[in-house]
Amino acid sequence: GRCNIGTVYVCRDGPVFTYAQIKDFISSEY
């Protein structure tokens, strides 16, 4: 998969979001 979620690079910054936040963000973006 991609390292970035929106403008946040997860591989670099680490898991800065909870799963629920990520899922909600992805569903709203895609």
Image (cartoon, grey):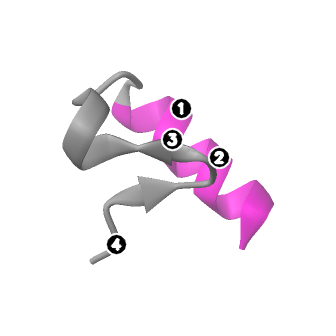
Mark nearer the N terminus (4 vs 1): 4
User: Could you tell me how far apart the alpha carbons at marks 4 and 3 are, in whole angstroms?
Assistant: 11 Å
Q: Which residue was labeled with disc 3?
A: 8
Q: Which residue was labeled with disc 1?
A: 21
Q: Which residue was labeled with disc 4?
A: 2
Q: In the image, is residue 26 part of the stretch drawn in magenta?
A: yes
Secondary structure under the numbered disc 2 in the rendered image: helix
User: Could you tell me how far apart the alpha carbons at marks 4 and 1 are, in whole angstroms?
Assistant: 17 Å
Mark nearer the N terminus (3 vs 2): 3
Disc 1 to disc 3: CB gap under 8 Å:
no
Q: Amino acid at mark 3?
A: Val
Q: In the image, is residue 29 part of the stretch drawn in magenta?
A: yes
Q: Amino acid at mark 4?
A: Arg
Secondary structure under the numbered disc 3 in the rendered image: strand
**Label 1 Cα neighbours within 10 Å, binned few <14 / some 14-19 / many ≥20:** few
- Left or right relative to 17: residue 12: left
Magenta part of the chain: 19-30
**Foreground pick, 1 / 23:** 1
Mark nearer the N terminus (4 vs 2): 4
**Label 4 Cα neighbours within 10 Å, binned few <14 / some 14-19 / many ≥20:** few
- Left or right relative to 28: residue 3: left
Disc 3 to disc 2: CB gap under 8 Å:
no
Disc 1 to disc 2: CB gap under 8 Å:
yes
Between marks 3 and 2 in the image, the one whose residue lies nearer the viewer: 3
User: Could you tell me how far apart the alpha carbons at marks 4 and 2 are, in whole angstroms?
Assistant: 14 Å
> x, y percentage for residue 10?
32, 43
Mark nearer the N terminus (4 vs 3): 4
Q: Quadrant of the C terminus?
A: bottom right
> x, y percentage for residue 29?
75, 62
- Left or right relative to 13: residue 23: right
Q: State the residue at coordinates (34%, 72%).
A: 2
Q: Which residue was labeled with disc 2?
A: 25
